[in-house]
Amino acid sequence: METKRCPICLQTKNITEYYSYYSKSRAKNRISNYCKPCGKSSSLIRAKRHYQNNIEEKKIYAKAYQANPENREKVKRWRTDAKIRHRKNLQNCYVRELLRTRNNLTNADIESIPEIVETKRLQVKIKRKLKSLRNGKE
Ligand SMILES: [Zn+2]
């Protein structure tokens, strides 16, 4: 069993706990430096920082992209599809949106109660289940 030490969490883990990727420059598969959970969070942090550092450039790019009517349609379609997907899968963003709009909570309220998103998700699941049962009987 091959293992590797992650420099972020300092744990030694099986290499199956690491992502592998193809390195073009070395022309072979490589194993990521960071374990999967650390790699995920560090890449999210990097992406966020990159966005913050390049926010003006990103805004200009987005504006130019949406100036093209064809792209505007694409973006519209993508947003609608995403909304449907988020609603169907009860994703965090959708559940948080419900808490803000229907329960009049602020983001600070939501952050202050860690279980609230999961609880709301269950509530919506129950409501949907009851509705489908009711409709099935009619
Ligand atoms: Zn790690």
Image (cartoon, helix red, strand yellow):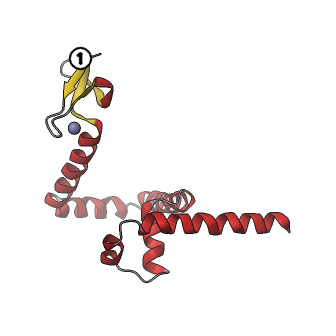
Mark 1 residue crowding within 10 angstroms, few (<14) / some (14–19) / many (20+): few
Mark 1 residue type: Ala
Is 37 placed left or right of 11 in the picture? right
Residue 91 point in image, percent of width and height: 47, 59
Give residue 24's quadrant in the image: top left
Is 131 placed left or right of 100 in the picture? right
Tell me: residue 87, above or below residue 37.
Answer: below
Residue drawn 36% across and 73% down? 110
Give 107 or 84, whichever is nearer the viewer: 107
Report the number of numbered marks. Answer: 1
Residue 39 point in image, percent of width and height: 24, 40
Q: Secondary structure at mark 1?
A: loop
Whether residue 23 can be seen here: no
The answer to whether the residue bearing label 1 lies less than 8 angstroms from the nearest atom of ligand 1 is no
Q: Quadrant of ligand 1?
A: top left
- Residue placed under numbered mark 1 in the picture: 27
User: Looking at the figure, which quarter contains the N terminus?
Assistant: top left
Is 132 placed left or right of 43 in the picture? right
Whether residue 133 can be seen here: yes
Give 136 or 63, whichever is nearer the viewer: 136
Give residue 68's quadrant in the image: bottom left
Residue drawn 47% across and 81% down? 103
Tell me: residue 25, above or below residue 48.
Answer: above
Residue 121 point in image, percent of width and height: 51, 64
Residue 122 point in image, percent of width and height: 54, 64
Extreme-bottom residue of the structure: 104
Residue drawn 70% across and 67% down? 130
